[in-house]
Image: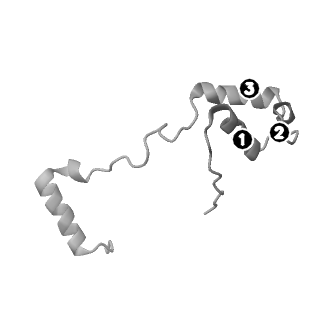
Amino acid sequence: MDLNVQLHYVERVCKIVRHSGMEAIALKKMGRPVGSNEILTFEQEEEIQKTLLETTPDTHKYRGFLWDNRLIRQLIKDKWGLKFVEQPLTIT
């Protein structure tokens, strides 16, 4: 059975296991900690949701009658000075 793994990689992993044990090669949790990329607090999110449900953009002196991403970002910037960067949606 061919695993298509280079010998030097297997030797390196074996050396690490002999020196530090299996814990050294265990899968580690990667990425940002949960919640670390949150910009709004829970209370701010609730306030924005309530505003979006109970008002329209024109009541806040914005042009338009329906909330869209641009207007929501502007509302958050005006309320708390927080600026969001618009990121395009990518499909892979």
- When asked about the image quadrant of residue 76, the answer is top right
Question: Residue at label 2?
Answer: 62
Residue drawn at x 58%, y 27% is 42
* Nearest to N terminus: mark 1 or mark 3: 3
Question: Residue at label 1?
Answer: 74
Query: What kind of element bears circle 3?
Result: helix
89 on left or right of 18: right
Residue drawn at x 21%, y 73% is 8
70 on left or right of 32: right
Q: Quadrant of the C terminus?
A: bottom right
Q: Looking at the picture, does residue 32 appear above or below residue 3?
A: above
Q: Position of residue 6 (x, y in %)?
A: 27, 74
Residue drawn at x 78%, y 44% is 68
User: Between marks 1 and 3, how big is the CA–CA gap?
Assistant: 16 Å
Query: What kind of element bears circle 2?
Result: loop
Marks 2 and 1: CB-CB under 8 Å?
yes
Closer to the camera, 77 or 23? 77
| Callout 3 crowding tier (Cα within 10 Å): few <14, some 14–19, many ≥20 | few
Type of amino acid under label 3: Lys
Q: Quadrant of the N terminus?
A: bottom left
Type of amino acid under label 1: Gln
| Callout 2 crowding tier (Cα within 10 Å): few <14, some 14–19, many ≥20 | few
Q: How is the image coloured?
A: one colour
Q: Looking at the picture, does residue 79 appear above or below residue 71?
A: above
| Callout 1 crowding tier (Cα within 10 Å): few <14, some 14–19, many ≥20 | some
Residue drawn at x 82%, y 39% is 62
Q: Looking at the picture, does residue 87 appear above or below residue 3?
A: above
Question: Residue at label 3?
Answer: 50
Q: Position of residue 54 (x, y in %)?
A: 81, 26
Q: Looking at the picture, does residue 9 appear above or below residue 20?
A: below
* Nearest to N terminus: mark 2 or mark 1: 2
Query: What kind of element bears circle 1?
Result: helix
